[in-house]
Structure formats: C-alpha cells, structure tokens
Amino acid sequence: MYHDPSTAFAQQPSDADSDDPFSLVDSAAVAEERFKAGVAYHQEAQYKMALISLQRALDMLSSVEPGLLKGKIYNAIATVHYSQRRYLWALEPARKALAIGESLDNNYLRLICLDQIGNSYRHLNDLDKALAALQESRQIAESMANSKILSRSLNNLGLAYKAKRDYAQAINCYEQSLLLAKENGNMRKVSQILRNIGNLHHRIGDYAKTVDYYSQLLDVESSPLDTSTKIKILRNISSACYALGRYSMAVQYLKQRLKLAQKVSDLKVQEQSLDDLSLNYDALGKTDHVLHYQEQRLQICLELRNSQLQQQALDRLRATCLSVGDFERILKYQHLFNGRTA
C-alpha cells in the first residue's frame, strides 16, 4: 500500500542550509584556534605540526570568502616554509596572502607579504624581483607613518641591496633603519642592524667604521649576542683592528674570543684565536707573549690531530725561537721538529 506522498514528504528530514550563519561563525572560530595553534607550533620550531594545523585552518574556511583570517593563515604558511629555508615554497602562499591584503586594502598584510616575497627572492638570488617587492614594502611603510614598521622594511631592503652589491644604497637603508630603531628603543633591532652595518663595512674593507659599529654592537647589553655570533663578531673586529694597526685593541678582543671558545670547548676557534694573538703581539714586539701563544696554539693543533696545522704551528714556533736564540725551547720540541708529526 502506498502512502500519501504529501505525508511522506512531511516525514523526511529537512535539508541542511549551507548558508546557515551560525555554522559559518563556528567554522571561523575553529579556524582561528587552529591558526593560533599553527603559529605556536612554528614558534617552537615544530614545522610539520605547524603546517598541518594551518592547513586545517584553511580547510575550515574553504566555503568562506577570502578575509583577513585567511590572509593571515596563508602568510603564516609562507613563514613556516621560509623558516625551513624553503624559499620557493614560501612564494605561493605569500602571493595568495598579498592578493587578499590588496582586496581588503589592508596595508599591514600587504607589507608583511611583500617582505616575505622580497626576502624569499633575495635568498633565491632573484634580486630584481626582491628589490621590487621590498621597495613597494618601504613605500607602504612610509605611508603608514609607523617608525617600527619602516625600520624593519628599510633593514630588509638594505639586505637586498647588499646582495646586489650596491653597498652605498645598503648602508643608506641600514643607517635610516638604525636611527628609527634607536628612536623606538628597540634594542634587539638596534643590535641586529649594527651587526648588518658592521658586516658590510668589514666586507668592503672600511675597517675604521667596522670597528665603530661592531664596538657599538658589543656594548648593547640589553640585547646580548649568542655565543656563536659573538665569536664571529670578535674575530671580525680584531682583524679590522689589526689592519688599522691597533694591535693592543685587537689583543683585547681576541682574548675575549679565546675565553668564549674555551667556554664552549671549540678547539678550532681556540687555534685561530691563539694564532691571531701571536701575530698581534709580534706586531707589538712582545716576543715572550708571541712564544707563549704559539706554544698554546701548538698544543691545540696536536689535540685537533690536523697535520697541516701542526706543521704550520711548528714552523712558526721554530722561526720565532731562532729569531731570538731560544734554543732551549727548540730542544723542548725537538722530537716534534724531527718527527714532523703525522
């Protein structure tokens, strides 16, 4: 027996409304939470989990018109790829985020996406595209009249000019960025920019300015450098001092470098520091100090079991001993001179 079709229809479950505003609100709320989780994972360097969480956030918004949250998610995905040095992978999500920023006329989203794109192109050595993106970022930053944002944009632009070997433009950008960072009291940023300027002056052989900017960097106590970076800075500033004939100053920086290297048990850096110390003391005419550091260097070379370094250290020590007639010291190491350590 057939049922009355009108009553059968009435008994069917109602169709789901795809435009139910409450379901969209719920999706957006969940997407926001997953976005925040993705950012947290990224901050903890859990990149795989960050990408999973961010992709799930995007999936929650698949039926939603592009909005600020979706733009932020795309930019976060680009940032995770960038942090893993997957610069080519960072470009596509950054471009999608940029398109959303432009559609919303959101200058901040546009700016951070252009920075992401420009920095990625810089690492990919596509410097014309890098400069185009970063110059546009600077223009937006200037229009926003936000000195913190402008300082960051100028620093990024300086890095691109440096990569293109337009050092005058790079220094100009860095110095403007440094001035703004100092005005804002952002000492972490000040430290970063001082390092960039010092590195650039060292590269182009302007050693007086190298010493000036690196010494300022080392004095920024509120934003201390990590040990590895400080070791590199101390070698650069000491080599600049040596080139300028400021041997006593070079010695002070090298002693700091040696102490740090000993603290972290880095034999290679200890060997370099001891060799540089002996060279500076030789320039100062202090032979006793030269011999002292040459002997220490030889012992480190023996620990390193590097035959080439051992021979260099032996030759240097022997030459110094002969120059001052220190035959007793030569006899002390005679077994090494004869054996030419393997």
Image (tube, grey):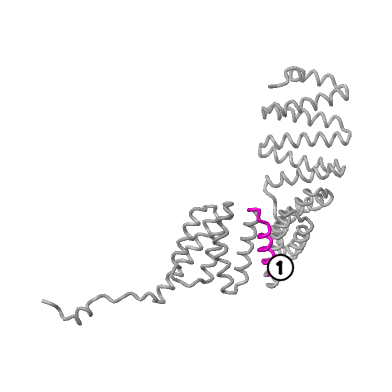
Residue at image location 63% in from the left, 64% down from the top? 114
Residue at image location 54% in from the left, 61% down from the top? 93
Q: How far across and down, in percent of the image, does residue 32 sit?
A: 49, 67
User: Magenta includes 129?
Assistant: yes
| Quadrant the N terminus occupies | bottom left
Report the side of 287 relative to 107 (left or right). Answer: right
Q: Which residue is mark 1?
A: 147
Q: How many marks?
A: 1
| Quadrant the C terminus occupies | top right
Which residue is outermost to the left?
A: 1
> In which quadrant of the rendered view does residue 299 lie?
top right
Q: Is residue 21 visible?
A: yes
Q: How far across and down, in percent of the image, does residue 157 sit?
A: 70, 60
Magenta stretch, residue numbers = 124-139
User: Magenta includes 224?
Assistant: no
**Amino acid on which disc 1 is placed:** Ser
> In which quadrant of the rendered view does residue 324 lie?
top right
Q: Main secondary structure of the magenta part?
A: helix
- Above or below 17: residue 48: above
Residue at image location 75% in from the left, 44% down from the top? 234
Q: Is residue 218 visible?
A: no
